[in-house]
Image (cartoon, grey):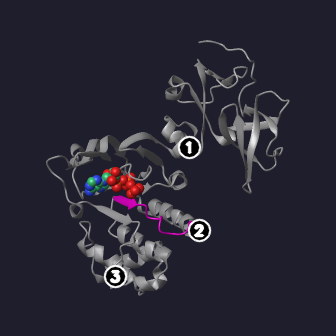
Amino acid sequence: MIKVNHVSKKYGSFTALHAIDLEIGDGEFIAVLGPSGCGKTTLLKLLAGFMGPTDGTISMDDTVLASTKHVLPPEKRNIGMVFQSFALWPHMTVAEHVKFPLSYHPNKVKEGRKELQARIDKVLKLVGLDALAERYPSELSGGQKQRVALARAIAPLPNLLLMDEPLSALDVELRMEMRKEIQKLHRETKASIVFVTHDQGEALAIADKIVVMNQGRIEQIAPPEVLYTRPETEFVATFVGKCNLVKGQWRGDQFVPTIDSDNVWHDLGVADSFKTSGIYPVRPEQFQLMAADSKGMQGVVSFVQYQGHEIQYTVEVGEATWTIHESVVATRFETGDVVGISLKNAPKQTGTIVSN
Ligand code: ATP
């Protein structure tokens, strides 16, 4: 277990990280997600030991790895690293890239030549490069280069694998494929992984737990599904997927939207922080569009976008603009249509408010 305890990092007078607390369990796959400049790489550099914290400590089990007084350097830690730029050595073959860290890593093998070769073969097979062992980086595609970087990182059996946007230099198709490869590596190596990304789809797809960062602070830590269905802050609700932040009044577990007080919505799992600020966060697929004469709020469709598996509607409701996603098999609406809008899966609306 790695514990980041109240870690802050300043660059001169600028605070890049504000009192971060984070636990990384053995074998856990964590995605660190946030916009550019929020401090993701800074956190990764601290975890690697490239620099020390301005405040707080980082420890592994009972050993302090970094504090304001002392930092255990990267070469003395059992970590592997993969970067966005593959950082391969042009004069080394694929096999040599894997062999190199086995000789210099703190977890280096003490086996003989035969065993060493067997280990190199095993790692290359794991990343699907066994047929390309003698190639140089200039003879490889982008995806193959990233596989070499992955193989090099996992070869010495690190217990922590740090990945800084490892897939962002690849095209969409290859990225999808490499996500699976990384999940497979995680399954087989059992290393803890900290995977930095600014791509929310990637984080949701790949990690056991997501750490959402904003301006040097952690906004929320949760498994992907919890993060999506129960965001705790406006930032998380809108950064991770699309979200309509509907304003209104919370009375116990019932919500009356300001825009139309004839409607009452029931609590489908909204975090307390939204209740305090008078907001109901509604995902585009949580709304249902109906004919104008049905119950629900009234709105006017201003844009319709066909997306293959769904239709994305933009609907003007009073002063607000909402995004609503409907299945292609649902009733279709066109720009200019007046529509009724309700919340899906909500218990029958009574129109009466029950105060707690
Ligand atoms: P990106 O997604 O763009 O890589 P990030 O979330 O990884 O961003 P960091 O690289 O950790 O962000 O940077 C966090 C903040 O600290 C940024 O505002 C950045 O400008 C600042 N920063 C980073 N390194 C230094 C440095 N060596 N000196 C001064 N400021 C720095």
The residue at 53%/30% (across/down) is 271
Q: Is residue 228 above or below residue 52?
A: above
Ligand 1 in which quarter: bottom left
Q: Nearer the viewer, residue 332 or 148?
A: 332
Residue beneath disc 3 = 96
Q: Check disc 2 and report its element: helix, strand or loop.
A: helix
Please name the amino acid that badge 2 sits on: Glu
Marks 3 and 2, how far apart in space? 28 Å
Marks 2 and 1, how far apart in space? 24 Å
Q: Position of residue 126 (x, y in %)?
A: 46, 72
Q: Nearer the viewer, residue 273 or 194?
A: 273
Please name the amino acid that badge 1 sits on: Glu
Residue 194 appears in the picture as rendered: no
Question: Which image quarter is the C terminus in?
Answer: top right
Respond yes or no on whether mark 2 lies under 8 Å from ligand 1.
no
Determine crowd level at label 3: few under 14, some 14-19, many 20+ residues with C-alpha closer than 10 A.
some
Question: Is 100 on the left or on the right of 291, as rendered?
Answer: left
Residue beneath disc 1 = 225
Q: Position of residue 81 (x, y in %)?
A: 34, 64
